[in-house]
Amino acid sequence: MKLSYQIPKQDINLEPFMSRPPQYNRKTIIMKTDRVYKCEIINVIELTSLEKLFHLKILDPAEREIFYFRPGQFVMLEVPGFGEVPISISSSSNNKEFIELCIRRAGRTTNILHRAQKGARVGLRGPFGTSFPMEKMASHNILLIAGGLGLAPLRAPIYWVNEHRNEYRDVHILYGTKEPGQMLFTYQYEEWEKVNRIKLLTIVEEANKDWPGRTGLITELFKEITIDPDNTCAIVCGPPVMFKFVCNHLYTLGLPMNRMFVSLERRMHCGMGKCCRCMVGSTFTCVDGPVFDYWFVLNLKEAI
């Protein structure tokens, strides 16, 4: 008599590990699944001639609820048929309705994204990487310093501070760009100052005739604030060349390097340490970072 055995059907979505957000950071638990969240673009905001802000909604309500990230982490955004790119998250970690990604038009995939309209479908993997230690910075004065596109990854820590405003002391945002037309999120400046009690200082290197504000390098803004080095933490985002000038200036003012945090997110490529393109020495900046304190970065050859 011939016996037959039928393998029972298995729904991977019912497995215990699928009910938890995936942890891709090598320092924690690496999941056995590389989940792709199917998303829809629900809004597109043109910020400058090169940058657009995309609102992405995860289609599955259950996946939308379990997706969680921390300020400083990034995602891999996939455009089917054209590849994927690493993008830092610019929204609040408490926002379960949609994810905000600020994307600069800089290559093949991002050019395609800039042509996308509301309703387009994309894929999302992540979140990846380390994050800013927001809880450890509680009860301190906070300096949030950004150059150019660096305001995009800095926006998540700004949201965090706004939502936990009573846990922090004085908060300053120092923001500089090459020219006025490159400034991002200008529609939120008044809210940050009046509603959230954050002091905002902006500066441009090259002013035009319509620019009423400050002109010069971003380090000029330090002359307008008082820094208590014993009770201050700093987050710095922007082009790597900026780190040396800003962080070294902060160090001359007495701020310890282990209380300055920078993001090396511009080196990201695959997000999981497989392609080795983000390697600096023996460090994978995508899985060991992208957030590091400045002391670690100084000892990381060719990091900046």
Image (cartoon, rainbow, N blue to C red):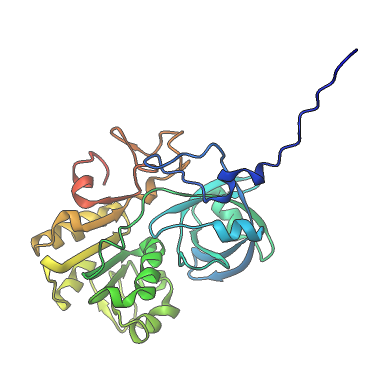
Q: Which image quadrant is residue 142 in? A: bottom left
Q: Position of residue 188 (x, y in %)?
A: 42, 79
Residue shown at 49% from the left, 52% from the top? 75
Please identify the residue farthest to the front as the structure is shown: 1
Q: Position of residue 21 (x, y in %)?
A: 52, 51
Please identify the residue farthest to the bottom as the structure is shown: 194
Looking at the rendered structure, the number of numbered marks drawn on it comes to: 0
Residue shown at 19% from the left, 45% from the top? 298
Residue 202 showing in the rendered view: no
Task: Assign the N terminus to one quadrant of the image.
Answer: top right
Q: Position of residue 56 (x, y in %)?
A: 59, 62
- In this view, 82 is above or below 49: above
- In this view, 249 is above or below 292: below
Residue 234 showing in the rendered view: yes
Q: Relative to 32, is 238 on the left or the right?
A: left
Please identify the residue farthest to the right as the structure is shown: 1
User: Is 155 in front, or is 107?
Assistant: 155
Q: Which image quadrant is residue 35 in? A: top right
Residue shown at 38% from the left, 50% from the top? 265
Q: Position of residue 217 (x, y in %)?
A: 22, 67
Residue shown at 51% from the left, 40% from the top? 31
Q: Which image quadrant is residue 27 in? A: top left
Q: Relative to 58, is 237 on the left or the right?
A: left
